Image (tube, rainbow, N blue to C red):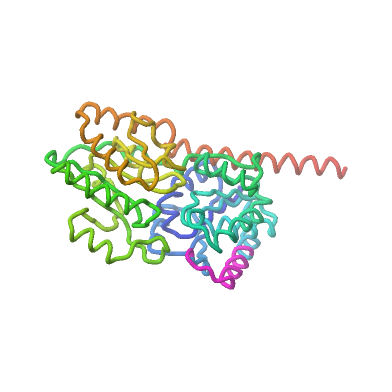
Amino acid sequence: MKKIAIVANSTWNIYNFRLNLIRQFRTKGYRVIVIAPVDEYIHYLNESHFTKHISLQHLSPQSKNPFKELLLLRELYKIYKREKPDLILHYTIKPNIYGSIAARWAKIPCISTVTGLGYTFLNYGFYTRLIKPLYKFAFQSNQKIVFHNNDDQELFTKLNLISQEKSRVIKGSGVNTNFFRPLKGNVDNRKFIFLFVGRLLYDKGIVEFIQASKQVRQIIKNAECWVVGELNSKNPSNIPKRELLQWVENRYIRYWGATNDIRDFIKKADVMVLPSYREGMPRAVLEAMSMGKPIITTDTAGCRESIAHDKNGYLVPVKDHLALAEAMVKIYSLDQDKLEQMGKESRTKVLKEFDEKIINQRYLELAEEIFHEKKRTTTTSKKILR
């Protein structure tokens, strides 16, 4: 029985994005081990029987301490040598870089998934200049590199960080379309709700959403702009707490904090809005689409691939709060039939392109392709030796 390792920067990531992939691999007869720092989401093991979890001690996502990075590299290498998986799947930046290097040293095939570029590529500085050659060095021996959108794949190819033939595009981590399905009831028709879901980061376009909401609420008296998301003070792109306080006090938004189940907020919303600067494949948008909601988002990497403009929503330029406000007023002005049709188009698009069954099957096929290639290479080597 072949063993597959899945490596990420948190158990939260495993719980939210990889559980059904783990189940898919196990259904097909593979053993699965998970390698990630332990957090409160370790409870996933209660339902994920026969999955072994190995805790990473030296992975700190925000740390830039070179000594800690070397400790992480050493730790991953020792785990790979001890566990001897047949294939390793890396997710998130540090597992992608240090895990790929450790896999090369341990002579184990691996697939790295670039789930998004985010702050590192949007903000130019010393760390940005450093991470690009790190990516190039780390990915040299990877069997495959997966991207969540075409723009990221093209950028890495253009920067000569990867070879084109090694790369694949798989559109996100997939959505459970049964869990995220259209829900009826408890909707206040006297309000028109624009919903922003995401961490409160400048890169997510939260400031543009606030600026647009101030204008929209002057024009649309029954409009409310809701924000659901974590205020993460460790991220360098995080908004200051005093700024959030001002927005709430001035009634620009209604802030609901973070939640473990976003469905009730999506159900009550009329439109999902995400004016992000760049994404891998925005999960919150796909979840809202799966629940039959129209979308307003930016014409940028990751975001544009989820929207058919004027069919299931609108695309607006990045960092343009005026265009965003205009799109919000425009979608409010649509009649109810058109708005519902947009929501149906969103649901249809998710079912065709982003359902987790489709996404997980792509990863399964990729793993089997690597195993087949390894078997063919081994057979050829034995014939040469004879």
Magenta run includes residue 64 = yes
Magenta run includes residue 209 = no
Say if 138 sits above or below 266 in the image.
Answer: below
Figure quadrant of residue 263? top left
Q: Residue 168 at x, y = what percent?
A: 58, 40
Q: Residue 148 at x, y = what percent?
A: 50, 43
In the image as oriented, which residue stretches furthest toward the bottom? 67
Numbered-mark total: 0
Q: Which residues are magenta?
A: 61-77
Q: Considering depth in this image, is 102 or 82 the residue closer to the camera?
A: 102
Figure quadrant of residue 74? bottom right
In the image as oriented, which residue stretches furthest toward the right? 386
Q: Residue at x 46, y 56 (%)?
A: 119
Q: Residue 302 at x, y = what percent?
A: 45, 42
Q: Residue at x 32, y 34 (%)?
A: 313
Say if 139 sits above or below 221 in the image.
Answer: below
Q: Report the side of 369 relative to 210 (left or right).
A: right
Q: Residue 32 at x, y = what percent?
A: 53, 52
Q: Considering depth in this image, is 78 or 276 the residue closer to the camera?
A: 276
Figure quadrant of residue 293? top left
Q: Report the side of 53 relative to 206 (left or right).
A: right
Q: Residue at x 63, y 65 (%)?
A: 78
Q: Report the side of 353 relative to 113 (left or right).
A: left
User: In which quadrant of the rendered image does the C terminus lie?
Assistant: top right
Magenta-colored segment: predominant secondary structure: helix
